[in-house]
Image: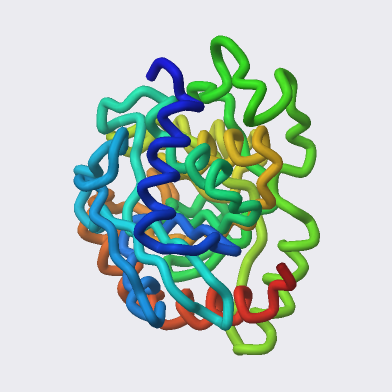
Amino acid sequence: MDNIFEKAKETAGFIKDRIKDIPQIAIILGSGLGPLADEIESKVEIDYKDIPNFPLTTVEGHAGKFVYGLLGNKKVLAMKGRFHHYEGYDVSQIVFPIRTFKVLGINNLIVTNASGGINKAFKPGDLMIIKDHISFFAPSPLRGRNINEFGLRFPDMSKAYSPDLVELCKKSAQKVGVDVKEGVYAFAQGPMYETPAEIRALGVLGADAVGMSTVPEVIAARHANINVLGISCVTNMAAGILDQPLCHEEVMRTAKEAENNFTRLVKQVISDWEV
């Protein structure tokens, strides 16, 4: 996408005209996790197909719309559905919503996803706070000419996921009685699931879970100095961990089962978040 900053300004202007406000927190909802948006009050909904310069999501479990309103006493803008490299989108399109958030004046982001568990102490349905990621296999959203309006040429990624927000999330989980894990998320390009050999390699590298999203968005967010909290729903065990085939239906089914805990946790985090 040429003139990304100008396009982000146009897109942000369209959204701002619809919501008439500046959200305090943006939320990206992964596969099967969109029902959290149903909890938003005084909502305004905007279909992606109506937004200038915006891609369209093509994956089951991704509704393809923004929902703006009040959640946990904060003004939030939630994405019901994101964009993936495997859908055929260029990485600049995948992170275009992040850049739109920045132009809108949003400085806080919650990224969520469905993932495959690599850590054998995990089980399907667990919620994992992302403390770090492995992005070796992610196409860089910062490749090419730096867009100075968003951030520096060489951004620091040593605290990609805010340690303060990790601690906040753990305390919020205790308040609502939701058990949470903590771990490292690895990016895989998809759409095929990883091989057992790839999962063993990622485990050696220190990954606790693997998925096909999130990392490009987080890189773009930190480039733009947006604070990030990541929460992953372990919807299945990764290839080779259990002797069974992997399928998207299991991802959606487990996300549905974890929906109550996920919703309670995120609502409490937002309520406790001082922005």
Where residue 151 sits in the image (x, y, percent)? 69, 29
Q: Is residue 63 left or right of residue 272?
A: left
Q: In this view, does 46 lie to the left or right of 13?
A: left
Going 53% across and 67% down the picture, which residue do you hit?
127
Q: Nearer the viewer, residue 205 or 127?
A: 127
Say which quarter of the image contains residue 16: bottom left
Can residue 162 be seen here? The reply is yes
In the depicted structure, whether residue 152 falls above or below residue 206? above
| 143 or 163, nearer to the observer | 143
Indicate the colouring scheme: rainbow
Examine the image and state in which quarter residue 66 appears: bottom left
Count up the numbered dots. Answer: 0
Q: Which residue shows up at 23% across the image and 51% down it?
A: 247
Considering only vertical position in the picture, is 146 above or below 263? above
- For the point 54% across and 38% down, the residue is 215
Asked whether residue 62 is in view, the answer is no
Percent x, y of residue 155: 74, 27
Q: Which of the pair 57/193 is nearer the observer? A: 57
Residue 102 spot, x, y in % from top left: 58, 43
Looking at the rendering, in which quadrant would you find the C terminus? bottom right
Q: Position of residue 129 (x, y in %)?
A: 62, 61
Residue at 38% x, 80% y is 42
Is the N terminus in the top left, top right, bottom left or bottom right quadrant?
top left
